[in-house]
Image: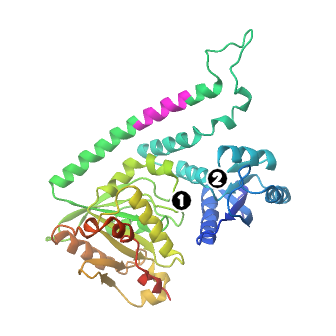
Amino acid sequence: MIPSNLINAALVGIDFGKIDFEASLEELSLLAQSAGANPLVTLTGRRSSPDAKMFVGSGKAEELRLACEANDIELVIFNHALAPAQQRNLEQALNRRVIDRTSLILDIFAQRARSHEGKLQVELAQLQYLSTRLIRAWTHLERQKGGIGLRGPGETQLETDRRLIGERIKALKTRLEKLRRQHGTQRRARSRNQTMSVSLVGYTNAGKSTLFNALTKAQAYAADQLFATLDTTSRRVYLGDEAGQVVVSDTVGFIRELPHQLVAAFRATLEETIHADLLLHVVDASSAVRLDQIDQVNEVLHAIGADTIRQVLVFNKIDAVPELAARGDAVERDEYGNISRVFLSARTGQGLDTLRAAIAEIATAEPLSDTLVDLSEEDRSAAPREDRKVSELGH
């Protein structure tokens, strides 16, 4: 039974010929549900390029309007980034609220932020997004007011709002920069103590927090939902007398077409990834689109400058893939003898000892391999993308 507080929503996805269209649309449905919407209608279509006025053509817009009326739809969610004018025109044509994929993800982040730093980062991303769309709320005040009793301070309401938002953005950036410097001080202290830093990265809902809890015996929030974790949590893990302690950090999950506002706003959080000694790239081994998710994560890592850090692929949830679960604990190595893949189930514990041993081996080895750093620019862009051997997984 659907909870009565959910908002009835229509999802819209236009196929421009991308190979991940179906997966992206399924992901939009999960995002909508995570935000508290009840997707009742899904409307798709094909185009070579977006319509300048309403993103979809007038015929598709009319089809969408009729579907909304027939299903009591309150909210329309586009699986694309809409221009402010397109969003305004669609709302007028549909007589309903319209949001795009970026706005939906920002809303989920706003709901999930728990720490002071996380809330600051989400507010910054929201304000940066809103600053380009203020005209939607103030179309009746576009001109300078004039006349008796209407003369203002020399700026329209729209200009006032833009100025106030600009000042708030500047203040937020200053506060986040202070937090970033504090993180840097903590990292330098760990470096002086020669403590290895390990960051868990991966696609959202790959099981990073569950793995983090299993490794560190922590109680970080973990749930079967998108973006369950927004705030970076770090814990020390003892790996034996030889390897000593390492610091393991759980980070925010990545997603395809992650809004650039979030990447910029979450700089302080993502710094933990940039300065890690080792990345454990957690992959949902049971996902049919795991190869695409690996590529999406590597694109974000490249965007934040973390693509040259040593990376080990950790295929999680093998308990949901009988062929992998039957193999038992498994480690694969690359042509240089470095550990490249580990297979485990964070939920059942299978393979956790293997992962701990792998981290300990890397921690006690010679300085981390600079293989990726030494590659040419062309090879480096291709190197983080997982070779297609893993396409055999689960088949």
Residue at figure coordinates x 63%, y 71% from the top left: 22
Percent x, y of residue 194: 16, 58
What is the total number of numbered labels drawn onto the structure image? 2
The label shown at residue 369 is: none
State whether residue 118 is above or below residue 302. Answer: above
Indicate which disc, 1 or 2, sits on the residue closer to the N terminus.
2
Q: Which residue is mark 1?
A: 257
Q: Which quadrant of the rendered structure holds the N terminus?
A: bottom right
Judged by its main secondary structure, the magenta piece is helix
281 left or right of 133?
left
Percent x, y of residue 348: 41, 78
| Res. 199 visible in picture | yes
Crowding at label 2, few (<14), some or many (≥20) Cα neighbours within 10 Å?
some
Among the 4 quarters of the image, the one containing residue 143: top right
Between residue 182 and residue 62, name the one nearer to us. Answer: 62
Percent x, y of residue 312: 33, 72
Asked if residue 50 lies in the magenta stretch, the reply is: no
Q: Which residue is mark 2?
A: 100
Tell me if label 1 and label 2 are in contact, CB under 8 Å: no
- Which kind of residue does numbered mark 2 sit on? Asp
In this picture, which residue range is highlighted in magenta?
163-173
SS of the residue at dot 1? loop
SS of the residue at dot 2? loop
Percent x, y of residue 156: 65, 23
Among the 4 quarters of the image, the one containing residue 389: bottom left
Asked if residue 167 lies in the magenta stretch, the reply is: yes
- Which kind of residue does numbered mark 1 sit on? Glu
- Look at the image and name its color scheme: rainbow
Residue at figure coordinates x 74%, y 8% from the top left: 148
Among the 4 quarters of the image, the one containing residue 238: bottom left
